Amino acid sequence: MLRIFQRLWQVNWAEQWQYRANLVMYLLYWLVSPVVYLAVWTAIADAQGSVNGLTANDFVTYYMTLLIVDQLTSEITIHIFGYKIQDGTLSGELIRPVHPILTNTLVNNVAFKALTLLALIPVWLALGLLFRPDFGSVTLVNVLLAAPAVALGFAVSFLLGAALTCVAFWSTRVWSLYELYAGLVVLFSGQFVPLTLMPAPVQAAAQFLPFQLFKYIPIQIILGRLTPAEIITSYLSGVVWLAAAALLFRAVWSAGVKRFSAVGA
Amino acid sequence: MNYNPGRSATAKSVSMTSEPVIVVEQLSKTYQVTEREGGFAAAVRGFFRRQYRDVHAVQQVSFRIAPGEVVGFLGPNGAGKTTTLKMLSGLLHPTSGSAQVLGFTPWQLRPSYLRSMTLVMGQRNRLAWDIPAADSFLLNQAIYRLPDDEYQRTLAELDELLELGPIMRKPVRNLSLGERMKCELAAGLLHRPRVLFLDEPTIGLDITAQARIRAFLQEYNRRTGATILLTSHYMADVTALCERVIIIHHGQLKYDGSLGDLSRRIAPFKLIGVALGEAVDVALDAYGAPVQGEDDSGKRFIQVPAGDVTAVTARLLADLPVHDITITEPPIEDVIERAFNA
């Protein structure tokens, strides 16, 4: 199995390099909103002294950590797999003796991440020079504590994204559905603003949704803003969500493949 | 070259006995398609109540194929050939009936089944588009768990037969149609499948490339004893490769037997195309059965029994101001239409 992933990595990495210009465009597009939020909130906090107890430095460190965490936990399955269901190219992958999403698509996501992360580094350093953040609260222990949370966040986001992509087995409108989902992620994951600045109902709802696992929780762990008890509860809820997402994906995938093989594509 | 088809000898594997490798019983596939008439009102009606129509793509088809056989699966467009191949390779669930290939029910998509068969369909299937085929081959080696020495041996053999050489080191998107087909075939055969389903392996290729693929398949079958079921539009594929043909038309099995018997059954005929001088308006009925329509160069066509071609051509040339004349094989659709719709 390890060899399969190794070879998949070679193929996907080589393929991603073919589209490096595309990747840079994507990265620029994807950078715009966090950088704008970063600038706006820092300016407001600077002018007022703080916003809801968050200082300008809190905002800078939050958004700069977000840039990295978001890159690590986001997924692009619908873009690399959705069309395969619709134009039938999935057939070629279905008759291979390995799972198309849990092997090829997974590695494709990771290769994409690795390459965009490479491109992100200079941008991140430039922002650091510009905003001069104080990352004093970040310790090695925090980062080590956050690493599994990042992995968990990616696992849940990958499985949910994959399950959603599988809606393409039934509907060509899967893209609109995905837009809706992406909107919910932005709102409830802490991508827009730190969740503590959101209205109380949004914060309450976020507790019952998986999205804060993608961004808010790993960021807060890295920045040392969660108590040990909060970290434990977050991990527990993460594990529950992982199990739920895995079950959901398995159910949608097998029903989807059954449908694919019933109607043909 | 020695080849061991029973590489992964499982209880289910069928070795080179006379027990059939493929058993198809009463296999049927019905698609439900939505349909509506044109126009605004119909669009609105269709929004609220969809009209469905059943399309019987394959109807109660049964056949058996013995190990090592090369069988041609023929039929006009839409006859149900590809649907049948998709069911046998596991991509489609049948509506009714059963099929066993190497002892497996294909649509259960068991990994051990997928490792012992291949489906080569179209031009973009197993190869990553942007990288050289050689990289996709390495990936297949891992996916099919092929030991290094076995992989190298097979690749060398495929390279020798298909002359892959430099083409497998170019990005797939830069390859010609024929080169790509060679690479697709190689990618589909690296794991030495015991059963090959080939859907139009020569479509879109020029005559030389077609001949090369045919020679390859013949040699592959001879060396490995693999069972091959192939569909084709070209009668030449079938005459070169298959002793046995299965013909399917409108989803039903019309013929299953030797190619020789089929040829006797279908009175062979050829198409003669003639371009006459300007303003010559002669009926060609006297020379053969006219075929409707003419081609771009203004040629008109007649059907003539194969044995009479020389005589009819001579008469045409003697009687009429002929500018151009061609003699061609009729399209396979016409042959089947004539044989089974008469």
Image (spheres, coloured by chain):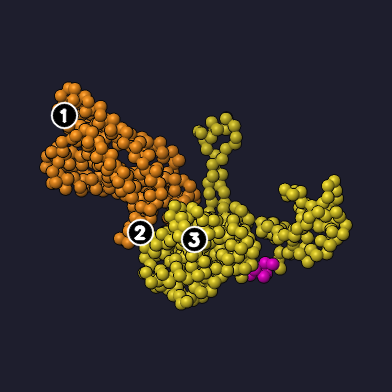
Chain colours: A orange, B yellow
Circles 1 and 2 in contact, beta carbons < 8 Å: no
Instruction: Examine the image and state in which quarter residue A35 appears.
Output: top left
- In this rendering, do the residues under marks 1 and 2 share a single chain? yes
Per the model, the C-alpha gap separating discs 2 and 3 is 20 Å
Per the model, the C-alpha gap separating discs 1 and 2 is 47 Å
Does residue B24 sit above or below A126 in this rendering? Answer: below
**What amino acid is at disc 3?**
Ile
Q: Chain of mark 3?
A: B
Where residue B101 sits in the image (x, y, percent)? Answer: 47, 65
* Residue at image location 40% in from the left, 46% down from the top: A19
**What amino acid is at disc 2?**
Arg
Circles 2 and 3 in contact, beta carbons < 8 Å: no
Per the model, the C-alpha gap separating discs 1 and 3 is 61 Å
**What amino acid is at disc 1?**
Thr
Question: Is A107 situated left or right of B117 in this image?
Answer: left
The magenta segment is: B257-263
The residue carrying mark 3 is: B167
Identify the mark at residue A7; answer none if there is no mark.
Answer: 2
Tell me if residue B276 can be seen.
yes
Where residue A113 sits in the image (x, y, percent)? Answer: 31, 46
Q: Chain of mark 2?
A: A
Can residue B229 be found in the magenta stretch? no
Q: Residue furthest left?
A: A228
